[in-house]
Image: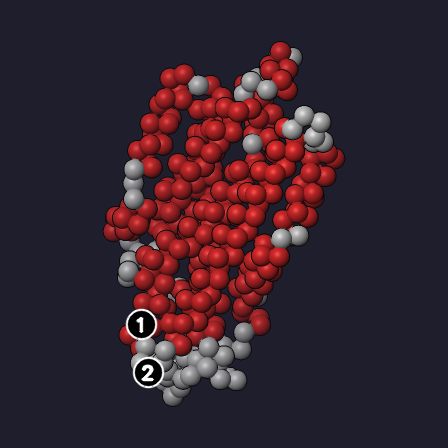
């Protein structure tokens, strides 16, 4: 356990040594904390309307200006972060809880179970993300739950395929066969021996799918089939703001910038983490390399 903890700390240190990843992590941490503490730190509520101060430009009182109903755009951007983060967390949870066991069983047992499970994954992989999400929302209705379920289902194949590839590379390792020789059950071997050694690419996929989930949620809202108003959503703000580009050009600019920075931060963090884990894997596998 101490060796695994040491490797985890070493990986975290190498990721934070990358300036882009460090800035991305700081931005995401600040956004998450602000979204969680919004009720206590923001001077305005995201739903409070003020018809006297509609479509105001950014200023010392309303930092990002106001929308067509006089609502504070900065507050709505912060509360919109809650919508995006909850959707991402829910989608990743659904995809991981279903996709990882599928890939684990397919890679560990092989044979007909592998074929059957991966054909199911191929069916899910053939579903276009946005269109499938729109179809599911048409059935379930416009809600955050429908959005995160749709994104989560489309994310199952990526988790399943990545987990299966890792399990196949670990299946015949000496430490796995040793556990089998000592009488370890298949479930013990899968979840206590193989899975802990396959977490690296799964963790990277968590970061990548989070950015995809946020982007799909914003796209659905922009198309008018996402989370219904008045719940703040970056995509909904972009959709409404494009109608006021001449009167209040900053209306759509600030939600768009925050959305862009969030996607770029998650992408940078995911790429850096993947590179660090890949380098560590090469060092471990090199003859004479230290684990």
Q: Where, quadrant-wise, is the N terminus in this rendering?
A: top right
Position of 157 relative to 13 (above/below): above
- Give how far across and how far down residue 54 sits, in percent: 37, 84
Q: CA distance from mark 1 to mark 2?
A: 10 Å
Tell whether 227 sits left or right of 167: left
Mark 2, other Cα within 10 Å: few <14 / some 14–19 / many ≥20: few
Q: What residue lies at 67% left-to-right and 41% top-to-bottom?
A: 8
Q: Where, quadrant-wise, is the C terminus in this rendering?
A: top right
- Give how far across and how far down residue 262 sits, in percent: 48, 59
Q: Is residue 49 visible?
A: no
The residue nearer to you, when weighing 72 against 165, is 165
Q: What residue lies at 58% left-to-right and 57% top-to-bottom?
A: 20
Tell whether 290 sits left or right of 18: right
Position of 287 relative to 9 (above/below): above
* Residue at the extreme right of the image, as rendered: 2
The residue nearer to you, when weighing 181 against 266, is 266
Q: Is residue 263 visible?
A: yes
The residue nearer to you, when weighing 93 against 248, is 248
- Give how far across and how far down residue 159 sits, in percent: 45, 37
- Indicate which disc, 1 or 2, sits on the residue closer to the N terminus: 1
Q: What residue lies at 44% left-to-right and 19% top-to-bottom?
A: 110
Helix, strand or loop at label 2? It is loop
Instruction: Say which residue label 2 marks.
Output: 247
The numbered dot on residue 111 is none
Tell whether 41 sits left or right of 95: right
Instruction: Say which residue label 1 marks.
Output: 242
Mark count:
2
Whether tag 1 and tag 2 are in contact, CB under 8 A, the answer is: no
């Amino acid at each position: 356990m101490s060796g695994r903890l040491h490797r985890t700390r070493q990986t975290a240190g190498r990721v934070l040594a990358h300036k882009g990843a460090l800035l991305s992590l700081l931005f995401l941490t600040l956004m998450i904390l602000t979204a969680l503490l919004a009720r206590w730190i923001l001077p305005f509520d995201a739903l409070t309307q003020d018809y006297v101060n509609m479509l105001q430009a950014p200023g010392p009182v309303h930092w990002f200006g106001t929308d067509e109903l006089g609502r504070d755009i900065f507050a709505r951007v912060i509360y919109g972060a809650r919508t995006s983060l909850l959707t991402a967390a829910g989608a990743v949870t659904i995809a991981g809880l279903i996709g990882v066991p599928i890939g684990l069983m397919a890679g560990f047992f092989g044979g007909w179970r592998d074929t059957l499970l991966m054909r199911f994954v191929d069916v899910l992989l053939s579903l276009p993300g946005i269109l499938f999400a729109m179809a599911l929302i048409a059935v379930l209705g416009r809600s955050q739950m429908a959005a995160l379920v749709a994104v989560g289902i489309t994310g199952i194949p990526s988790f399943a395929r990545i987990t299966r590839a890792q399990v196949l590379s670990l299946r015949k390792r000496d430490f796995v066969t040793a556990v089998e020789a000592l009488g370890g059950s298949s479930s013990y071997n899968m979840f206590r021996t193989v899975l802990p050694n396959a977490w690296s690419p799964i963790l990277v996929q968590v970061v990548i799918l989070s950015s995809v989930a946020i982007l799909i949620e914003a796209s659905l809202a922009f198309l008018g089939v996402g989370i219904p108003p008045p719940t703040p959503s970056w995509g909904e703000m972009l959709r409404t703001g494009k109608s006021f580009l001449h009167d209040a050009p900053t209306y759509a600019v600030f939600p768009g910038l925050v959305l862009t920075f969030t996607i770029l931060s998650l992408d940078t963090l995911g790429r850096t983490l993947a590179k660090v884990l890949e380098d560590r894997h090469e060092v471990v596998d090199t003859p004479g390399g230290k684990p």
